[in-house]
Amino acid sequence: MDIIRKYALINAVEYGGEASVKAVMGKVMGESPELRRDPKKVLELIKEEVSIINKMTKEEQEEELKRVYPEYFEKEEIKSKKELPPLPEAGYVVTRIPPEPNGLPHIGHGLSFYFNYYYARRYKGKVILRFDDTNPEKEKLEYYGKMKEGIAWLKIDWDEEHYESDDLPVLYQYAEKLIEQNDVYICFCPQPKIKEDRYSMKECECRKRDATENFRLWKEMLTGEKYILRLKGDMKSPDSQMRDPTLFRVVKTPHPIQKDKYVVWPTYDFACAIEDSVLGITHVLRSNEFHTKLQNYIRDLLELKHPIIIQYSRFNVKGSPASKRRLRPLIAQGLVKGWDDIRLTTLVALKRRGIVPEAIHALAVEMGLSTSEPQIDWSIIEALNRKIIDSRAKRYFFVPNPVKLYVENAPGITVKLRNHPDFDYGFREVKTGNTFYIPEKDVADEFRLKDLFNVTVTQRKDGELKGVFTGKELKKGLEKIQWVTDENVPVTVLIPHELFVDGEYNPESLEIVKGMAEEAVKTLPVDETIQFERFGFCRIDKVGEEITACFTHR
């Protein structure tokens, strides 16, 4: 059937030359529901077609796809022209990248950072790296550096660097202006009562104090008295965030930069509302969990200019939550091996996995500034990453779960292998003899050792094979399989899968594959991304007598 061939070729071209029966089945059934009447027959046809296509070279697959479905390549050209929409009221644009130094940046941060960077550069404006560091209980000095490292890895630069905690005297001045205007009040009430009053929409008795008394109590707060400063909002508002929110509280935990200099700290919404205005931010691009209404209300009281705020939904990667609350217990139990575990979406984990910064840029454009709640599938990230690294990654042979093969009458050949099928990255030479190692799952009665010759198996005994050389000429339909010689290097490949399935930790989320790679892999440095042919793209993670590689994707 043409539809089966079409989707098998598309899947093979997009996934490194190897089509997946399951993926093709999904596409075929989705486009032609009438085929669901006989799924067993369709499945057999798909298996047969996938087997044929997976034996083609990548070039043959692309040529056949151009013949069968030329529109595919036209769609790719259109898709590549996609870009982010223009900003409203875009004159001289000033944006901010506002990390909180309380953890490592993850993919959601990365996308948001990129949006703000992109628009500042698009309109030849300015981008400010502003640390929102007004919560001493959660912030650590090391995370300032980690955030900067993550942003730099994303190939994002900035024009100015700013620390909110340096501006506490300025924030105090605005707080005192609100006290003078009688727009805020000092509250002594315990948190349970405040919570109860908010729920029942009841005004606090502390609200009745006049500005003079509130100013006196504010001065006591500055010496460490455990009061809070609350906004006179609207206790009848359907938006609970507007029911007299806290603007300042006493925190005696030393700050990573300011140390013990201050004990009264603003809440995020107050600090952000002021800083966006006083720094001259023209456009704020951020996810929709932030409280625009409250921040605008504070600015209105203080007669400060509003930035243009563009909000989009939070970005979630399917099966890979970014929540520290969910991940910390897994790290403590040893089920996740740290914040750079390749199953995570922290930027250090993505880098270790082999995802490149340009793929995050492309993902930002692909997802756009959507207000729907996008569930990003790993396949989208992988497809974008593949387009970038495919032309860079040199090719090498790798044999997973190898079995030993002795070939009688094998001609001694020194074979020249191209380092890349499409680009001039040179050749490598491999000298062969009679002994090879091949993937156990690929063993058939007859096969071809890729780029060498044909072999017929004559004996299977004690987990080893014997075969006989049956010629160098290509035979139609004969499967080509990977091989390495006695001169090889042991490789362990870490393969990530979804960390959570149906909301629960997946104990099979990390697969470990042992195998052998050709000797040339010994010379590769840590961080190099390569393609193990017919297996997938991998990033070299550790080198030595044994190599560890992180599986990136097919």
Image (cartoon, rainbow, N blue to C red):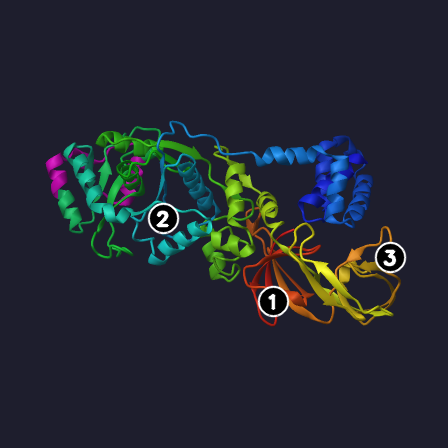
Residue shown at 42%/43% (left/top)?
A: 113
Circle 2 Cα neighbour tier, 10 Å, few/some/many (<14 / 14–19 / ≥20): many
Dot 3 or dot 2, earlier in sequence: 2
Q: Which labelled disc corresponds to residue 100?
A: 2
Q: Is mark 1 on a helix, strand or loop?
A: helix
Task: Give the residue drawn at x 37%, y 52%.
Answer: 102
Q: What residue type is labelled 2?
A: Glu
162 vs 256: above or below: above
Amino acid identity at mark 3: Glu
Task: Estimate the spatial distance between the alpha carbons at disc 3 and disc 2, rounded to whole Å.
Answer: 63 Å
- Per the picture, the main secondary structure of the magenta-coloured stretch is helix
* SS at circle 3: loop
Seen in the picture, residue 5 relative to 389 is either above or below; the reply is above
Q: Quadrant of residue 427?
A: bottom right
Q: Counting residues from the N terminus, which is met first, the one under dot 3 or under dot 1?
A: 3
Relative to residue 468, is residue 292 depicted above or below? above
Disc 3 and disc 1: Cα gap in Å? 33 Å
Q: Which region of the structure is painted magenta? A: 189-216
Closer-to-camera residue (483/432): 432
Q: Residue 523 carries which label?
A: 1
Give the number of the disc on residue 473. Answer: 3
Q: Residue at x 45, y 56 (%)?
A: 328
